[in-house]
Amino acid sequence: MSKTGYSFSSSRGGAESDLLSSLPLSRIDREIVGHLQQDGRRTYVSIANEIGVTEKTVRAHTKVLLDQKIIQIIALTSPVALGYQASALAAISIENPAMGTRILDELAQIKAIDYVVLTFSRFAIFAEIIAQDLQELQATIETQIGAIEGITSIEIFPYFRLHYQQAQIVNTNLVVQDGVIDAQMGKADRAIVAELALDGRAAYSVVAERLGISESQVRMRTQHLLANRQVKIMAIVNPLKLLDCTMSWVAINVGMDVQMSEVADALSSMPNISYVAICAGRFDIFVEVICMSKAELLEIIETRIRLVHGVVRTEAFIYTNLHYKRLLPLDFRDLIK
């Protein structure tokens, strides 16, 4: 979503697939992932000291996690900062439920789709489209999504704004007010973020050399972006592949007398909500919820989301499968095949 997550080498070579995967993880693996979700640039020495192993062990385990695409260390930010001007959620109906997994896999291979889920609901599949402009968005819908055999209808919810992102899910509930917000970013900041989106652990000296500015400027600007919650450098994982959890889109309608941004602000402050998008169409807001069970999901909807002033209707779409890949800076997107 911009659910943004990845594994991209510093040499900027291609990769067979950018989809996040899974393997059985040890206690050490999970603790390392937890630390890198809190801070993707945390030193291996500090992680080793925290979990009681050697630095060499942390390095070795992290290399496997990256090589196997269990994690991808990136700069989580808004799509606009990476050059994208048009985003939408596509709600897709299909001919037969038996086609779901095959269609899910085909959608995940479309360049402009960064996040696609199979659900139990009146829509079989949701796909997030992040495009350079409205023309690319329309072309993706017409010539790529619409060409997949078995799709019967597509309902599009264009984003007015990606309001909030929070991707920290390992070893803790989502941290309140620790996510990334949508805010204006200058040209120099966008260039720095684009480099860190390719490699969140890239040395500031390397980023500075590529951009032709000083290392101190890169460091200062990055710290400013982090402090203002315009970016977060962290490890991204696919929750359904790594955890025994329940995930759902929850679509929300807002009353006529309340501003959508006010409701989005209230939702963004809640634990377990990882994503908030304000959109056009029959729903006003989509939020993503990550929790431990369907019972907890029900409790979150009934006692938190529905009690937000202005919320007049909700509809949940529970995930059964999820493909998740990073959002590359626009200039480098074609390098991933």
Image (cartoon, grey):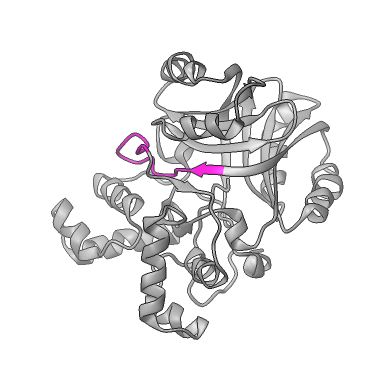
Quadrant the C terminus occupies: bottom right
Residues shaded magenta: 163-176
Query: Does the rendering let one see residue 17?
Result: no
Question: Looking at the image, which residue sits at the far front?
Answer: 257
What secondary structure predominates along the stretch shown in magenta?
loop
Instruction: Say whether residue 39 is magenta.
Output: no
Residue 229 position, x and y percent, is 42, 52
Which residue is painted at 44% across and 44% down in the image? 167
Q: Look at the picture and state if 133 lies above or below 200.
A: above
> Would residue 266 be found to the left or right of residue 51 on screen?
right
The answer to which image quadrant residue 169 occupies is top left
Residue 160 position, x and y percent, is 67, 42
The answer to which image quadrant residue 156 occupies is top right
Which residue is painted at 48% across and 30% down in the image? 267
> Would residue 226 be found to the left or right of residue 249 on screen?
left
Instruction: Say whether residue 169 is magenta.
Output: yes
Q: Look at the picture and state if 197 lies above or below 52.
A: below
Return the residue nearer the eye: 223 or 52: 223
Residue 103 position, x and y percent, is 72, 38
Return the residue nearer the eye: 117 or 203: 203
> Would residue 175 be found to the left or right of residue 325 on screen?
left
